[in-house]
Image (spheres, coloured by chain):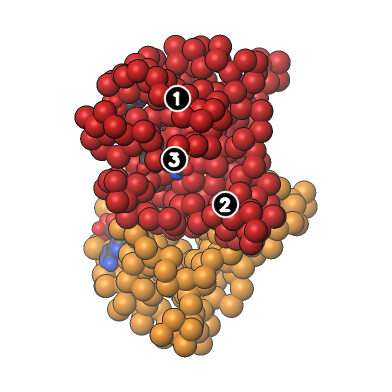
Chain colours: A red, B orange
Amino acid sequence: MATRIHNFSLSLDGFAAGDPQSFETPFGHAGQRLHAWMMATRVWDPEHGTSGVDEAFAQQYWRGIGAEIMGAHKFGPPGWQDDPDWRGWWGEEPPFHTPVFVLTHHAREPLEMGDTTFHFLTATPAEALRIASEAAGGQDVRIGGGATVARDFISAGLVDHVHLVQVPIVLGRGTQLWEGLEGFEEAYDVETTASPSGVTHLVFTRKSPLVTS
Amino acid sequence: MATRIHNFSLSLDGFAAGDPQSFETPFGHAGQRLHAWMMATRVWDPEHGTSGVDEAFAQQYWRGIGAEIMGAHKFGPPGWQDDPDWRGWWGEEPPFHTPVFVLTHHAREPLEMGDTTFHFLTATPAEALRIASEAAGGQDVRIGGGATVARDFISAGLVDHVHLVQVPIVLGRGTQLWEGLEGFEEAYDVETTASPSGVTHLVFTRKSPLVTS
Ligand SMILES: NC(=O)c1ccc[n+]([C@@H]2O[C@H](COP(=O)([O-])OP(=O)(O)OC[C@H]3O[C@@H](n4cnc5c(N)ncnc54)[C@H](OP(=O)(O)O)[C@@H]3O)[C@@H](O)[C@H]2O)c1
Ligand SMILES: NC(=O)c1ccc[n+]([C@@H]2O[C@H](COP(=O)([O-])OP(=O)(O)OC[C@H]3O[C@@H](n4cnc5c(N)ncnc54)[C@H](OP(=O)(O)O)[C@@H]3O)[C@@H](O)[C@H]2O)c1
């Protein structure tokens, strides 16, 4: 059982979303630029999308996952906590198909939609991971982002596999991944793959304790 | 005749040098981590170094260059301006073999060393480029860094080719390249190449005006 981050898109200057986040612009001024690489694949467009290295990486998102943990700002735009009718961005059949644990200081009752159930949770990263792992039934737990949650789980040493997708754009502002992660790479092996689409896949795999000790 | 940046190494979080810069630690706490990729090649170690994609890129540094422009902090550690005997980091046979223009607010007399001559210049990027281009005798001008100078020339729209080498480490602090470069990529085509050594080469080539207009 492992903890994984997948398809986490970053600009060259380390932003995972632009500014400001709103209902109309979930990724701020980044628009769709951070995810255009994925929207060009069959994951997004089964008929006309590509099936090369970008699709191969993108598909890993769903493989063997039993639960997701996400941040409050991924679940909805600023202010969703005050709207009892907000049910997430994903329509009535969200694409998760597992329990999803939304970290928030404004917890509410669980929300069942299709075969996805959203649970709202105030907890430390380690506690949240313990709860999600139990719910995952022996499968892996995905840390779904945004940057705040990804960074908190990485710096707590809780993530085994980190797949980042670097998009060659400079956003200038937004939500930063790297702050406070100085030297995090020392605990990982890294593999980099450049895609013909222009993005670079960086995969960090936690070193085996047997090798590092 | 073109203006080029080569072998410009960056951490994942966009730092081209660590902190603090000093005589003992020219790259601050980054040590040699930003340049280990190049030191492993034949460029640095002709006998035992590698001759793969990292060497191929590294060699471009010298090809067809008639002059370099560098910043004051590349030429010496903090305080070199107050030391009349400071002659650069590179010994009596500096590896440039062309005129080198050092941008500084503390200009001094030119310094001839081997077939490299250092000229000290207070000028805008555009003025400095005009002067260096004249000295380059029809060959290209290299913008040699550091990050401050690289950023100033890129944001002034003066650089035709930008070769960055992304090293998969997070430095946390130091001299940043990206600040103020939001959207710079719009004027460029980009090509990315992952090296088996773990670094990623990003090459930005300025779009032809015929194509963009
Ligand atoms: N680039 C990508 O691949 C990618 C991936 C996922 C998401 N995103 C985007 O990233 C943006 C969101 O990222 P973000 O960094 O702004 O926010 P986020 O990580 O989604 O959420 C952070 C918020 O979650 C709540 N939270 C976090 N940890 C908590 C804990 N331990 N206990 C209780 N509450 C906790 C807090 O909100 P409250 O205090 O308000 O409850 C906190 O401000 C969105 O635009 C989203 O679409 C991008
Ligand atoms: N990662 C890489 O590949 C790479 C490449 C090259 C260098 N480096 C490293 O980067 C560090 C230096 O970078 P940096 O960003 O701190 O400094 P820098 O770009 O080397 O130099 C900046 C300084 O140059 C002077 N200057 C710049 N523009 C000027 C102008 N138009 N007119 C007059 N003076 C001007 C100013 O100094 P004064 O006001 O003091 O005169 C300014 O503070 C060093 O550690 C160096 O070894 C790394």
Q: Is residue A113 visible?
A: yes
Up/down of B205 relative to A111, above or below? below
Amino acid type indicated by mark 2: Trp
The Cα–Cα distance between marks 3 and 2, rounded to whole angstroms, is 14 Å
Q: In this rendered view, identify the residue nearer to me: B136 or B142.
A: B142
Q: Are marks 1 and 3 in contact (CB under 8 Å)?
A: no
Q: Position of residue B132 (x, y in %)?
A: 40, 78
Q: Quadrant of the C terminus of chain A?
A: top right
Q: Nearer the viewer, mark 3 or mark 2?
A: 3
Q: Identify the subunit bearing mark 2.
A: A
Q: Position of residue B22 (x, y in %)?
A: 38, 41
Q: Name which of mark 1 and mark 3 comes first in the sequence.
A: 3
The Cα–Cα distance between marks 1 and 2, rounded to whole angstroms, is 24 Å
Q: In this rendered view, identify the residue nearer to me: A103 or B98.
A: A103
Up/down of A149 relative to B200, above or below? above
Q: Which mark is residue A44?
A: 2
Q: Name which of mark 3 and mark 2 comes first in the sequence.
A: 2
The Cα–Cα distance between marks 1 and 3, rounded to whole angstroms, is 13 Å
Q: Secondary structure at mark 3?
A: loop
Q: Nearer the viewer, mark 1 or mark 3?
A: 1
Residue at 74%, 56% (x, y): give it: B52
Q: Quadrant of the N terminus of chain A?
A: top right
Instruction: Quickly name the residue at label 1.
Output: A112
Q: Secondary structure at mark 1?
A: strand
Using a 10 Å C-alpha cutoff, classify the residue at mark 1 as few (fewer than 14 neighbours), some (14 to 19) or many (20 or more): some
Image check: A99 left or right of A30?
right
Q: Identify the subunit bearing mark 3.
A: A
Amino acid type indicated by mark 1: Glu
Q: Which mark is residue A90?
A: 3
